[in-house]
Image (spheres, rainbow, N blue to C red):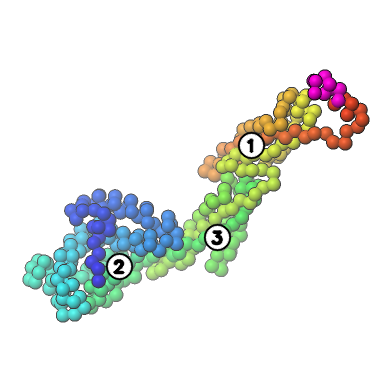
Amino acid sequence: MEYKDYYKMLDVKRNAGAEEIRKAYRKLARKYHPDVNPGDKTAEERFKEINEAYQVLTDPEARAKYDRLGASWSAYQRSGAQGGFDWNQWASGFGPGGGQQIDLNDILSELGSKGPGGFSDFFEAIFGNMGVGQQSAIPQKGQNYNQKVEITLEEAFSGTSRILRVGGRRLEVKIPKGTKTGTKVRVRGEGAEGASGGPRGDLYLEITVTPDPSFERVDDDLYLELPVNLYSAVLGGEAIVPTLRGKIKLKIPPETQSGRTFRLKGQGMPKLKNPDERGDLYAKVMVTLPENLSDEEIELFEELADIRGL
């Protein structure tokens, strides 16, 4: 059985202080946390190892006992690890007859109530050989649930809700204004039940905003193509612009070219973290040509073409 070096797991020296250990733990815990690495079993196991190491090394008495256990490890291994070796005798110090006797039951009680994940085989094998018995169950948070939900752009603009059935329960979940594709809405305590009295997991709604036929969304801004008739584009006029809050009038200056874009400030999507603020709406002019021209209209266009030398 391989010896677990808790100092190496946290990448700290054996004489590291408590604050240094805490900083190292926080850095590694953020990196390997299951919520950051969903479905990654390697990261999950690394996270458990980090927590086990942190539980021991941040408790001064448990850390001292672990150091003494580590000092006796090679002798334990030479004995064959599974029989004939008086571990209690060696655990009292660096050899038989030296130091203070270690109460392994006390180590279990000290470590068993801290943090997620329980002990590794490294501890279980040693404690089992000594007849200590099973460690007390550690409360663990329940598994998180993930539910995919589709909403329309209008629903993302105004905010909406969905009725879901989770674990036999009927649940109404509110989806906030400004939600985007990829947004996760967290509902605390609506996941699976925890183990050994631990809290329930959480429910996460994974949002997809379906494409809209009129608007293209880029972050909190909206884009649309605005048809403008030839006469308004040439002479100036007005165009009706659809928005998600209703229709508004836009003044079209004379000689507006097709492709010109007008910015309508504050007519875009609400910002998710501050729904009182909105993005902008960009209306791209698409000049439309007249159809079914009369003979008189054709003559007038021909006359205009002659005037302009076309």
With respect to residue 290, does 190 lie above or below?
Answer: below
Task: Pinpoint residue 223: horizontal percent, then vertical percent.
Answer: 64, 39
**Magenta segment:** 302-310
Choose top left, top right, bottom left or bottom right for residue 242: top right
Label 2 SS = loop
Task: Pinpoint residue 253: horizontal percent, then vertical percent.
Answer: 72, 25
Looking at the image, which residue is at 80% across and 28% down?
231
Which of the image's four quarters has the N terminus? bottom left
Decide which of 22, 48 is in the foreground and name it.
Answer: 48
Q: Amino acid at mark 2?
A: Phe
Distance from disc 1 to disc 2, alpha carbons, whole Å, reads: 57 Å
Label 1: few (<14), some (14–19) or many (≥20) C-alpha neighbours in 10 Å: many
Which of the image's four quarters has the C terminus? top right
Label 2: few (<14), some (14–19) or many (≥20) C-alpha neighbours in 10 Å: some
Marks 3 and 1: CB-CB under 8 Å? no
Label 1 SS = strand
Q: Which mark is residue 119?
A: 2
Task: Pinpoint residue 2: horizontal percent, then vertical percent.
Answer: 25, 68
With respect to residue 188, does 294 lie above or below?
Answer: above
Looking at the image, which residue is at 74% across and 36% down?
227
Q: Earlier in the sequence, mark 3 or mark 1?
A: 3
Distance from disc 3 to disc 2, alpha carbons, whole Å, reads: 32 Å
Which residue is farthest bottom?
84
Choose top left, top right, bottom left or bottom right for residue 254: top right
Residue 47 can be seen, yes or no: yes
Secondary structure of the magenta portion, mostly? helix
Decide which of 29, 11 is in the foreground and name it.
Answer: 11
Q: Which mark is residue 147?
A: 3
Q: Amino acid at mark 3?
A: Gln
Q: Which mark is residue 8?
A: none
Marks 3 and 2: CB-CB under 8 Å? no
Q: Which residue has dot 1 on it?
A: 281
